[in-house]
């Protein structure tokens, strides 16, 4: 069975007496281990779809399943990385990464071993005692990725995670992400509005479109891509 199944999903926002149709009749099945980029112009509904898969906002129509179970709220199975890193500012790098493990009630020694491994995986070992405000944007995104990996989430949802980074840092993090994805066999749903980024990362690109003058928003193109 596919890892994620999105069936007939629609989303209508009601704001100030107005209705905005953000998603309409989205059908999408994502196999386990696929790296999917969701590409499209601003406003076409990418974040809405990602948030629905995360369980942050329920769809108005249709259903989403992950691992066969209906998504009806957030859970550790589906880890989210935002563009604006959302790290706890009062916690060090190591504490931010350890947070999810502490919630799970893992023994202290296990937590320390996991954190050390994740710090090494993301080249953060020298920064473990720093606070987010003393890190560059790229380093903060490394911490955000490490935090999701700490939860051992088989599904990684990423909403323009590298959008605010300079080109060189972005390329480094893209390469790290590809390495992690290949090594840990994650299913990744990655939102971007950069065609270049989607071509570099994805083995499947979903292009979402937005028709001006119409409320209809659709999935338009589904491009499988052969990785060499
Ligand atoms: P994208 O991520 O592709 O830029 P979004 O999912 O953020 O698109 O938005 C899709 C549409 O829904 C846009 O028209 C946007 O203005 C609207 N929208 C998003 N969030 C809300 C909200 N909380 N309330 C009302 N409208 C919203
Ligand atoms: P360009 O697309 O700029 O002509 P290449 O396709 O030659 O560049 O790729 C440049 C580098 O990026 C190479 O080291 C290649 O292995 C790597 N690369 C390109 N696409 C991917 C991908 N989808 N996955 C992993 N590495 C990639």
Image (cartoon, helix red, strand yellow):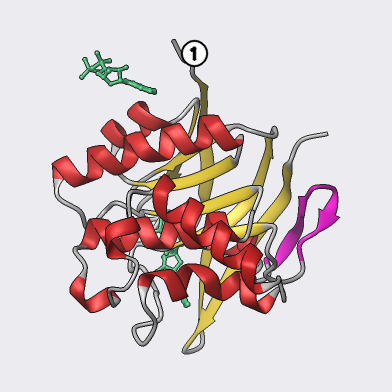
The residue identified by callout 1 is 226
Q: Nearer the viewer, residue 188 or 96?
A: 96
Neighbor class of circle 1 (other Cα within 10 Å; few <14, some 14-19, many 20+) is: few
Q: Main secondary structure of the magenta part?
A: strand
Quarter containing the N terminus: top right
- Left or right: residue 198 versus residue 102 is left
The reply to whether the magenta stretch includes residue 131 is no
- Taking the image as drawn, is residue 214 in sight? no
Residue visible at 70% across and 57% down in the picture: 77
- Estimate the x, y position of residue 212 in percent, counting from the top left: 35, 52
Rendering quarter of residue 102: bottom right
Quadrant location, ligand no. 2: top left
Quarter containing the C terminus: top left
- Estimate the x, y position of residue 174 in percent, counting from the top left: 33, 39
Secondary element at tag 1: loop
Q: Is residue 75 above or below residue 142?
A: below
Residue visible at 42% across and 62% down in the picture: 144
- Taking the image as drawn, is residue 99 in sight? yes
- Left or right: residue 56 versus residue 7 is left
Residue visible at 66% across and 78% down in the picture: 103
Rendering quarter of residue 94: bottom left
Q: Nearer the viewer, residue 86 or 213?
A: 86
Q: Nearer the viewer, residue 176 or 48?
A: 176
- Left or right: residue 224 versus residue 77 is left
Residue visible at 31% across and 43% down in the picture: 173
The range drawn in magenta is 59-71
Q: Is residue 121 above or below residue 227?
A: below
- Estimate the x, y position of residue 137 in percent, counting from the top left: 22, 62
The reply to whether the magenta stretch includes residue 63 is yes
């Amino acid at each position: 069975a596919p890892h994620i199944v999105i069936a007939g999903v629609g989303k209508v926002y009601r704001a100030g007496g107005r209705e905005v149709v953000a998603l309409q009749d989205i059908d999408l099945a994502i196999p386990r281990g696929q790296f999917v980029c969701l590409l499209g112009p601003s406003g076409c509904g990418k974040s809405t779809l990602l948030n629905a898969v995360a369980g942050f906002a329920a769809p108005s129509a249709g259903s989403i399943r992950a691992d066969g179970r209906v998504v009806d709220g957030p859970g550790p199975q589906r880890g989210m990385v935002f563009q604006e890193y959302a790290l706890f500012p009062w916690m060090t790098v190591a504490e931010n990464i350890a947070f999810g493990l502490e919630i799970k009630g893992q023994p202290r020694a296990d937590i320390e071993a996991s954190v050390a491994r994740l710090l090494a995986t993301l080249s953060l070992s020298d920064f473990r005692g720093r606070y987010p405000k003393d890190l560059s944007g790229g380093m903060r995104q490394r911490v955000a990725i490490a935090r999701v990996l700490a939860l051992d989430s088989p599904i990684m949802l990423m909403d323009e995670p590298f959008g605010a980074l300079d080109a060189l840092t972005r390329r480094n993090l893209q390469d790290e992400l590809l390495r992690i994805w290949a090594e840990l066999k994650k299913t990744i749903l990655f939102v971007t509005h950069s065609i270049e980024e989607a071509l570099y990362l994805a083995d499947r690109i979903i292009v979402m479109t937005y028709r001006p003058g119409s409320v209809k928003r659709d999935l338009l193109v589904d491009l499988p891509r052969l990785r060499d």
